[in-house]
């Protein structure tokens, strides 16, 4: 997609979401959107399948951009997923008026909320697929869990920004993602020792199990 066509597409999305927010989703026709965006009805249908597609058109752009993020070199696949989440945040936070309007529209239409759930899963799957590809041997459940956690943290912080909560910024998300890397034990900088770290004890094979248990009870807090 060229810069010119992308700009035109942005104008259609902005016009559609603004009309949905101001007039109501059901009360806005495709003709209304085309007229407001300065495009023909046929152009609208060629670019978007319908009214619900135009609401989520930004996500197609972002998902494509995140694949490009993953194609770039990274020192850690886990950190690459966090970098992708930050890139997604930058996109949506870059036009908060549009993000807030879309949030209000989607929240008020059950069918759009269902579509949003499916869209969120696409991010989770993209993140999990990247981890499985770049970390051979990784348990699928770990890839899925991390991908879902990153997506949930991103969405939580973005919603707080959309609701104009004080003190929420890109840094809020970056810190939350850094904490997530530590929680999963995959932070590239390593982990400081903790009181509940694994302890390995060695006993003679001939020692009775009861004595082994007794010593463990006495020595471990």
Image (cartoon, rainbow, N blue to C red):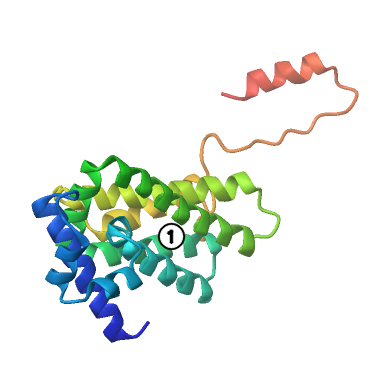
Q: Is residue 206 above or below residue 106?
A: above
Q: Quadrant of the C terminus?
A: top right
Q: In front here: 34 or 166?
A: 34
Q: Position of residue 58 (x, y in %)?
A: 31, 65
Question: How many numbered marks appear?
Answer: 1
Is residue 17 visible in this depiction of the protein? yes
Q: Quadrant of the N terminus?
A: bottom left
Q: Position of residue 171 (x, y in %)?
A: 27, 59
The residue at the point 54 percent across, 70 percent down is 75
Is residue 95 visible in this depiction of the protein? no
Q: In front here: 78 or 154?
A: 154
Q: Position of residue 45 (x, y in %)?
A: 31, 68
The residue at the point 22 percent across, 70 percent down is 12
The residue at the point 63 percent across, 48 percent down is 140
The image quarter containing residue 85 is bottom left
The image quarter containing residue 11 is bottom left
Q: Residues within 10 Å of mark 1 (few under 14, many from 20)?
A: many
Q: In front here: 143 or 32?
A: 32
The image quarter containing residue 135 is bottom right
Using residue 131 as the reference point, say whether residue 167 is left or right of it: left
Could you tell me which secondary element the residue under label 1 belongs to? helix
Q: Pointer 1: what residue?
A: 82
């Amino acid at each position: 997609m060229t810069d010119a066509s992308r700009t035109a597409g942005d104008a259609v999305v902005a016009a559609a979401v603004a009309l949905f927010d101001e007039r109501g989703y059901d009360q806005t026709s495709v003709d209304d959107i085309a007229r407001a965006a300065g495009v023909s009805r046929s152009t609208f249908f060629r670019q978007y399948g319908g009214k619900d597609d135009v609401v989520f058109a930004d996500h197609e752009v972002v998902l494509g951009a995140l694949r490009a993020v993953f194609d770039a070199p990274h020192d850690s696949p886990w950190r690459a997923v966090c970098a992708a989440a930050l890139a997604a945040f930058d996109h949506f936070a870059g036009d908060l008026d549009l993000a807030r309007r879309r949030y209000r529209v989607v929240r008020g239409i059950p069918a759009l909320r269902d579509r949003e759930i499916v869209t969120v899963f696409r991010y989770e799957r993209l993140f999990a697929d990247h981890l499985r590809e770049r970390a051979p041997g990784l348990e699928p459940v770990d890839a899925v869990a991390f991908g879902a956690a990153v997506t949930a943290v991103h969405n939580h912080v973005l919603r707080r920004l959309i609701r104009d909560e004080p003190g929420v910024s890109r840094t809020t998300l970056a810190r939350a993602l850094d904490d997530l890397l530590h929680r999963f034990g995959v932070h590239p900088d390593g982990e400081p020792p903790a009181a509940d770290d694994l302890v390995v004890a060695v006993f003679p094979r001939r020692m009775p199990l009861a004595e082994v248990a007794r010593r463990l009870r006495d020595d471990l807090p």
